[in-house]
Amino acid sequence: MKIVTRASLAPIMAALAWFAFPSGMASAQEAAPKPEAAVAAPASPAAPAEAEKPKDPVADALGYPPGLNAGTKLDLQWPVPAESKSVNPDGKDEVSMDELVQNVAHNKVSINMVWVLITGFMVMFMQAGFALVETGLCRAKHAAHVMATNLLIYPLGMIGFWICGFAFMFGGYFSGPVAIGWQPPFGQGLQLLSHEFSIELFGKPFGLIGTAGFFLGNDFLDTAVFALFLFQMVFMDTTATIPTGSMAERWNFKNFIIYGLWVGSLCYPIYGNWVWGGGWLAQLGMNFGLGHGHVDFAGSSVVHMTGGVLALVGSIIIGPRLGKYGADGKPHAIPGHNVPYVLLGTFILAFGWFGFNPGSTLAGTDNHAAIVAVNTMLASAGGALATTLYLYLTTGKPDPTMICNGMLAGLVAITAPCAFVSSLGSVIIGLISGVLVVLSVNFFDRVARIDDPVGAISVHGVCGAFGVLSVGIFSNGSYGAGWGGVHTLLKDGTIQTVLNDGTPEALKKYAELTGGGWADQGVTGILGPLFGGNYADWGQLSASGMGVLANIVFVGIAGYVWFKLSNLIFPLRSSKQDEMDGLDIPEMGVEAYPDFHLTDRSSPHVH
């Protein structure tokens, strides 16, 4: 070992002193008062005028500390073009009203865009949670296969969404029914998405599918469009990955690959257009007076129920795992191989839900996101607690994997109503979901004899349906005024409705009523008055019910046709021998745990 001595450090210390001493002396000389400064020297005619010293900053009313970093008028001058338009002939900079408006608008759009991007990144990370939950609930001999489906569904769905899914879902986004005075949160570039294919039924327009934005071509090279694409793409990916759990341990990987492209390009976007893209379900309020139309704030039906229905249809067609049901039809338990994976994945999903639900405000400037976040938390707590207590009462043992499903059930159910209900309503929704998911899992496993290794059908399908129905039950009118183009105004127990059809007459009537003390009500359910609402709206529950029915019919039929047709291209199910040996080596070529001897104690006997 080399020993460092004082002698060896001497050259280094000398060099440092050489650099430090002159600069230190210069600073000291500059700081010290100069004797000559006491006598005022006559100014030279050729010398430029001394610049005016800035005044000492003063703390403002908002409590910002004094200092230039708190913001000055220079920060409001628009940087393009480089030479400010507001420079006066006398050389003093003054911020023009145009620059002020541009900066405020730019900052609003930027805050919203940053918000939606960050929350979109959080939702993308939920894919890791799904991978851990599903893999942990499956057997070790299939672990690499299950992980791979959760990984590859991300790029597969994304490419399908990029090719045509986004266009089908949001091509007519800007033309959908909205509240009076609504402005696109990411800027006016969203006006590019104004092409919706509609048909006329009963004298009313029925939006069916968007027709603009394919491949995100150059005509749509706009920051607003791209921000919407990213956020909505990760939502689509959540739907796409749900069947990977219900069909795990026997799904042929080649068939899965073409499924991933299909679900992101056709099935999910079409139903999504009907709800979020301004289609016919969103128009139920405008067209038929059913509340504010089918309202789904963050995706209980659009995302979770769609995935749950696909999981149900796929599980029926692919059939149960080998040995799951005996000759007498009774189910055999097939435990997962890694319970800690399941719990860790659930925590990741719960964290990602703070992007899923609050992010669906699509605006960091919408402070209601705080209420959405708290309601999301409370429902997850109610779901986990209700499942725990129910298991104690019925089995005497609180299965931790089922507790995880209880928490996820609460999160799925609150996803649609999270912006429209009170904190008490959120807890109640969570408690109901926590019991509902256990009953549903037992029904599909024991009565319907549909094999679902992870409970995806129950968590996402059943509780997704309950969640969107909860909008029509528990909403209290505190949020969503003008949602779906419907303004429900209340005064002295009397209700008047103004529809935002874009006519001057509608705008005039709305202005007169609100100016006369009429209060615009938000989305309200039939039990709204019990939770602070002013009236009960049965039309809202009807719209929610129609959305649930439409999902079951359309997604169910589309999924059935797809799985049957795709089976003709690549077999839907892996071979019997591969399933018995484990899909890791036959289909993936690698084992998840090559250094461990897998005893496979959990697999039932196969005749």
Image (tube, helix red, strand yellow):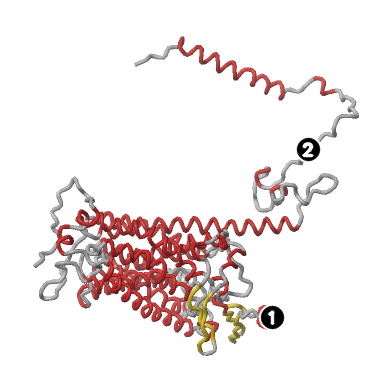
- Asked whether residue 210 appears in the rendered view, the answer is yes
Which residue, given by chain and number where applicable, does mark 2 sit on?
53
Which residue position is annotated with label 1?
504
Q: Earlier in the sequence, mark 2 or mark 1?
A: 2
Residue sitting at 60 percent across and 77 percent down? Answer: 520
Quarter assignment of residue 405: bottom left
Relative placement, left or right, of 379 versus 566 is right
Rate crowding at label 1 as few (under 14), some (14 to 19) or many (20 or more) other CA atoms within 10 Å. few
Where 605 falls versus 122 (above or below)?
below
Measured in 3D between alpha carbons, the distance from the residue under mark 2 to the one under mark 1, in whole angstroms, is 54 Å
The image quarter in which residue 173 lies: bottom right
Q: Is residue 30 left or right of residue 449?
A: right
Dot 1 amino acid type? Pro
Look at the numbered disc 2 and give the secondary structure of its residue.
Answer: loop
Indicate which label's residue lies in the foreground, 2 or 1: 1
- Is residue 311 positioned above or below 153 on the image? below
Few, some or many residues within 10 Å of mark 2 (<14, 14–19, 20+):
few
Element marked by disc 1: helix
Q: Is residue 440 left or right of residue 173?
A: left
Residue 298 location (% of width, % of height):
46, 68
Residue at horizontal 70%, vertical 51%? 78
In the rendered image of this protein, does residue 199 appear above or below residue 271? below
**How far across and down, in percent of the image, does residue 529 sit?**
49, 80
Q: Position of residue 238 (x, y in %)?
A: 38, 63
Disc 2 marks a residue whose amino acid type is: Lys
The C terminus sits in image quarter: bottom left
| Residue 517 in sight | no
Placement of the N terminus among the 4 image quadrants: top left
Give percent across and percent down for residue 402.
27, 65
